[in-house]
């Protein structure tokens, strides 16, 4: 290799190594360190722990509740098991696909059977999966729709269950960006605490 070429290659190699170290090592370590100092709960996965400090879930990933005395979340179509974060994704069925129509009809029928005291119109987020299949929230409307089943299963007044929903409902930062939502795991934990008191 000629000396003239080396004058171009050497600075290029040095810059490649320096930029790799800066953007591939230093920057990720710096941002990770700062996030763990400033936003520790979020950086650690927004984990939810029980009174014994045992991790029982995350605010960011739904769980599969199926008992009648708990609120149910959105359907999850992650491949091997519901709410599997390692298999995040939607069903990829088009709106015109008959399999999607049948799945929604089956979900509506199952929800109406499990919630006979609720109105006939089932909230859409209880019968359709999200793009990730991991949604931890449902709309406040979907939670209120399930309230009669929860009240009956737990022997609680409906007004008390609805108040619990209201107390655990969060609104979007800017009102028109989405509906009021409830974290299903948080709401079910509040239900358990209510029963314990």
Image (cartoon, rainbow, N blue to C red):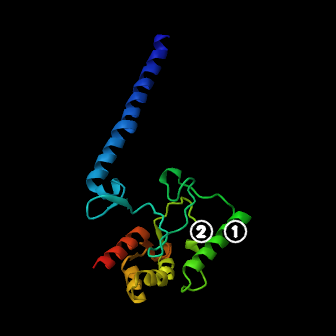
Q: Nearer the viewer, residue 94 or 156?
A: 156
Gap between marks 1 and 2 measured at Cα: 12 Å
**Residue sitting at x 59%, y 58%:** 90
Q: Write down the residue under mark 2.
A: 128
Residue 119 locus on image (x, y percent): 57, 86
**Residue sitting at x 43%, y 84%:** 151
Residue 123 locus on image (x, y percent): 57, 77
User: How crowded is the residue under tag 1: few (<14 C-alpha within 10 Å), some, or many (20+)?
Assistant: few
Look at the image and tell me whether residue 123 can be seen.
no
User: How crowded is the residue under tag 2: few (<14 C-alpha within 10 Å), some, or many (20+)?
Assistant: some
Query: Where is 145 relative to 20, above or below?
Result: below
**Residue sitting at x 27%, y 59%:** 53
Look at the image and tell me whether residue 6 can be seen.
yes
Residue extending furthest top? 2
Front disc: 1 or 2: 1
Q: Nearer the viewer, residue 61 or 22?
A: 61
Please, what secondary structure does the residue beneath circle 2 have? loop
Please, what secondary structure does the residue beneath circle 1 have? helix
Query: Where is 187 relative to 84, above or below?
Result: below
- Which quadrant does the C terminus fall into? bottom left
Query: Where is 58 relative to 10, above or below?
Result: below
Q: Write down the residue under mark 1.
A: 102
The image quadrant of residue 120 is bottom right
User: Horizontal placement of 46 versus 122: left or right?
Assistant: left
Which numbered tag is attached to residue 141? Answer: none
Q: Nearer the viewer, residue 171 or 58?
A: 58
Name the N-terminal-most of marks 1 and 2.
1
The image quadrant of residue 39 is bottom left
Residue 167 locus on image (x, y percent): 36, 80
The image quadrant of residue 49 is bottom left
User: Horizontal placement of 128 versus 185: left or right?
Assistant: right
**Residue sitting at x 50%, y 55%:** 84
């Amino acid at each position: 290799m000629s000396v003239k070429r080396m004058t171009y290659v050497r600075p290029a190699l040095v810059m490649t190594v320096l930029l790799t170290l800066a953007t591939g090592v230093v920057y990720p370590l710096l941002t990770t360190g700062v996030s763990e100092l400033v936003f520790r709960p979020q950086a650690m996965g927004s984990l939810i722990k029980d009174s014994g400090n045992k991790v029982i879930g995350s605010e960011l990933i739904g769980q599969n509740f199926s008992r009648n005395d708990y609120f149910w979340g959105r359907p999850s179509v992650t491949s091997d098991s519901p709410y599997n974060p390692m298999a995040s994704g939607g069903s990829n069925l088009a709106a015109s696909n008959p399999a999607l129509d049948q799945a929604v009809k089956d979900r509506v029928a199952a929800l109406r059977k499990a919630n006979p005291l609720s109105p006939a119109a089932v909230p859409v987020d209880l019968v359709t999966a999200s793009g990730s299949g991991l949604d931890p929230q449902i709309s406040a409307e979907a939670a209120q729709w399930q309230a009669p089943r929860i009240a009956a299963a737990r022997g609680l007044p409906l007004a008390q269950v609805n108040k619990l929903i209201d107390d655990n409902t969060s609104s979007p930062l800017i009102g028109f960006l989405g509906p009021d939502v409830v974290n299903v795991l948080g709401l079910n934990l509040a239900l358990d605490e209510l029963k314990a008191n």
